[in-house]
Image: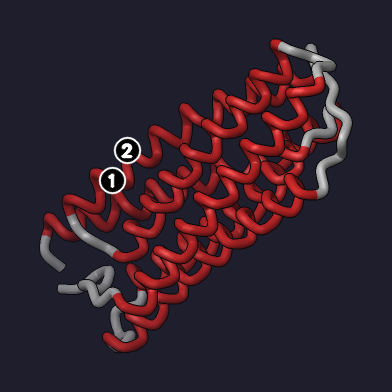
Amino acid sequence: MKQGLKTGVQKGQRTLLASLLASSLAPLATGIALFLNRSATQLADFIRRTAELAALFISWLVFRYLVREENISEAGKTHLERLVNSAVALALACSGLVLLLAALFSFGGHQGGSKVLLGLIIAVLGFVVNFIFWWRYRALARENYSSIIAAQRRLYLAKLFVDLGVITALSTLALFPNRVFTKYVDTLGSVLVASYLLWSSFRTWRGAKEEKTPAVGES
């Protein structure tokens, strides 16, 4: 393996592991916020983060296997890379559908104040972390292209848009508690974000079927 490619692969593996570890506590933190404040946005956010964590784990596992396994065939590498893209697409689709259902069958009652504030703080911190990882995956994809890294870039870009939707909805709930219109802001935000997630899922799934790129670890 060429030195430059080897360095890029090592960076990719470290970034995947770092993003997996950073995302591992997100479902727990969001679950606590959901328990304190019943919001359609936060319910979908909890399920979304859990599905994305599973996709990240599969991505890291496959990437690590491809780096270590030197005897795997080119067809085998391509199959596994497409499997990762499909897992990311499935996570996005699952998140989008759950968010859409949560919006259509909203709890109907929302609380404001400090309970919403906890969810808002978590969402803002999540946006900052996701932006850092998106920027990192974007740079890695430009240095040494890998379909697995490209899938993570698309995943984190989707995560950024979702975080913006969550921040907008929860900010409205925090600033205007117990107001009738906040219910519609929460629901509308969920529908818009769900639409983006489903669109991103379709793009990622189509890429997994059509994309033919250099495999990870190619010498």
Label 2: how many Cα within 10 Å (few below 14, some 14–19, many 20+):
few
Residue 166, horizontal then vertical, whole percent: 61, 32
Q: The residue under label 2 is which amino acid type? A: Trp
Q: In this rendering, does residue 42 appear at all?
A: yes
Which residue: 71% across, 46% down? 44
List the residue tagged with mark 1: 138
Residue 14: image location, x then y, percent: 38, 48
The local secondary structure at tag 2 comes to: helix
Would residue 184 appear left or right of 95 to someone viewing this image?
right
Q: Name the residue under label 2.
A: 135
- Amino acid residing under circle 1: Arg
Mark 1 → mark 2, Cα distance in angstroms: 5 Å
| Residue 203 drawn above or below residue 19 | below
Depicted 81 relative to depicted 111: above or below:
below
Q: Do the residues labelled 1 and 2 touch (CB within 8 Å)?
A: yes
Q: In x, y percent, where is residue 190?
A: 65, 41
| Location of the C terminus (image quadrant) | bottom left
| Depth order, front residue of 25/70 | 25
Is residue 105 or residue 152 the one in the foreground? 105
Q: Quadrant of residue 136?
A: top left
Residue at (86%, 39%) from the top-left corner? 107
Question: Quadrant of residue 205 in the image?
Answer: bottom left
Residue 87 or residue 13, whichever sits in front: 87
Instruction: Tell me the residue at 46%/43% (across/down).
Output: 18
At x 24%, y 53%, the residue is 141
